[in-house]
Amino acid sequence: MRTQVERFIASIGHERRYSPHTVRAYRRDLEQFLSFAEQRFGRALTPSDFELPALRGFVAALFPTCDSATVARKLSCLRSLGAFLVRERVRPDNPACLISLPKRRPVLPRVLDVDETFRLIEAAHVDGAVGARDLAVVEVLYSSGVRVAELCAVDLSDVELPADAREPGVIRVRHGKGGRERLVPFGGAARRALDAYLQRRAELGKGGRGAASPALWLNTRGGRLGVRSVARVVARASELAMNRTPASPHTLRHSCATHLLDAGAGLRTIQEILGHASLQTTQRYTHVSVDHLLEVYDRAHPRARRPPGQAPVVTTRLPAALGQPLAGQRRR
């Protein structure tokens, strides 16, 4: 069975062009299933063991320690493996499809308000080449809304900077989710921070190693900056700025989308910028914006103010306030 799993992992990476992050997640999930089933059977697994008893036992073992979204993701992984085994004629059927996916509780993304975002960006500004890089990283993350893995994969050749320094720049995302490529703009503040970083980029790395690298973002050894390093940059800046739970690169992505929506950008435009395959994924930001809208109203309107200590009653069922109908709701 492990041979078939390795072939499946290779197929999603090369043929279906899943992102490296997704491939690693699938590998971890399948290794967890194989270890569980091998312990249960007391021997190496064969394709004929890929049956409902083993699958249901694995899913049942997940629930005490995993939330419904994690269980659903792992079960989706097993469904994909089952479909692969059927296509390869290793199995006649896919029993994983007979197990219902657990209902996911919708979780709204964490979003910073504009003032919090600006404070975070200011906190990222320190002296030296590393400081110039960190400021540019945070500015571009917030300005473009790209995923952190997409940001780290950007090469110098993927950045378009007009001759006029006042003009915004464009990033070509070549390794987007699902292998999709797109062009993403970034604004003037990010452009200025990026220009300042590029002037000092060659200082990163010893012996000119950094100058020879095609990567846009370099670490102190001159290699490509990694996802974890970017996460540390954002977390450190958020702690300095707000003294609260550290923000993540994805927090800046969510904040970018929500602030665009608040300023009047259309969902289709935001979908293109974020690289969402489905508009339904983008629509969750309408819910975040409505929550924010009601909180601001509750604080500002004289007839809406609450008694001290009482939390606001917030709902996400007011899409008309932003001019966007709920999925399945017709415009009047």
Image (tube, rainbow, N blue to C red):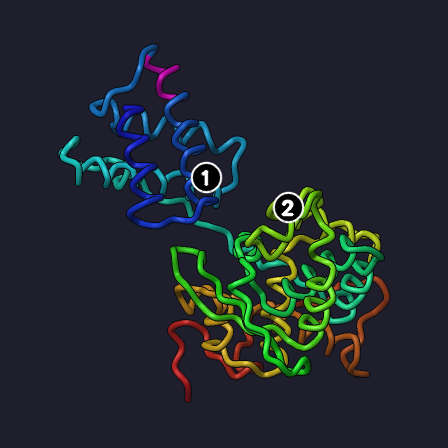
Give how far across and how far down residue 301 sits, in percent.
78, 82
The residue at 71%/46% (across/down) is: 232
* Residue found farthest to the bottom: 332
Residue 189 horizontal side relative to residue 109, left or right: right
Does the magenta-highlighted stretch encompass residue 56?
no
Seen in the picture, residue 97 relative to 315 is either above or below; the reply is above
When asked about the image quadrant of residue 193, the answer is bottom right
Give how far across and how far down residue 177 sits, in percent.
43, 56
Give how far across and how far down residue 131 sits, in percent.
78, 56
Residue for badge 1: 25
How crowded is the residue under tag 2: few (<14 C-alpha within 10 Å), some, or many (20+)? some
Q: Which three-letter amino acid code belongs to the residue tagged 1?
A: Ala
How crowded is the residue under tag 1: few (<14 C-alpha within 10 Å), some, or many (20+)? some
The residue at 60%/47% (across/down) is: 224
Which quadrant: the C terminus? bottom left
- Whichever of labels 1 and 2 marks the residue nearer the N terminus, that label is 1
Residue for badge 2: 209
Q: Main secondary structure of the magenta part?
A: helix
Instruction: Find the magenta span and give its range.
Output: 36-41
Seen in the picture, residue 199 relative to 50 is either above or below; the reply is below
Q: Circle 1 — which element?
A: helix
Q: Which three-letter amino acid code belongs to the residue tagged 2?
A: Arg
When asked about the image quadrant of residue 7, the answer is top left
Seen in the picture, residue 76 relative to 265 is either above or below; the reply is above
Which quadrant: the N terminus? top left
The residue at 67%/48% (across/down) is: 208
Q: Nearer the viewer, residue 100 or 309?
A: 100
| Total numbered labels | 2
Residue 243 horizontal side relative to residue 18, left or right: right
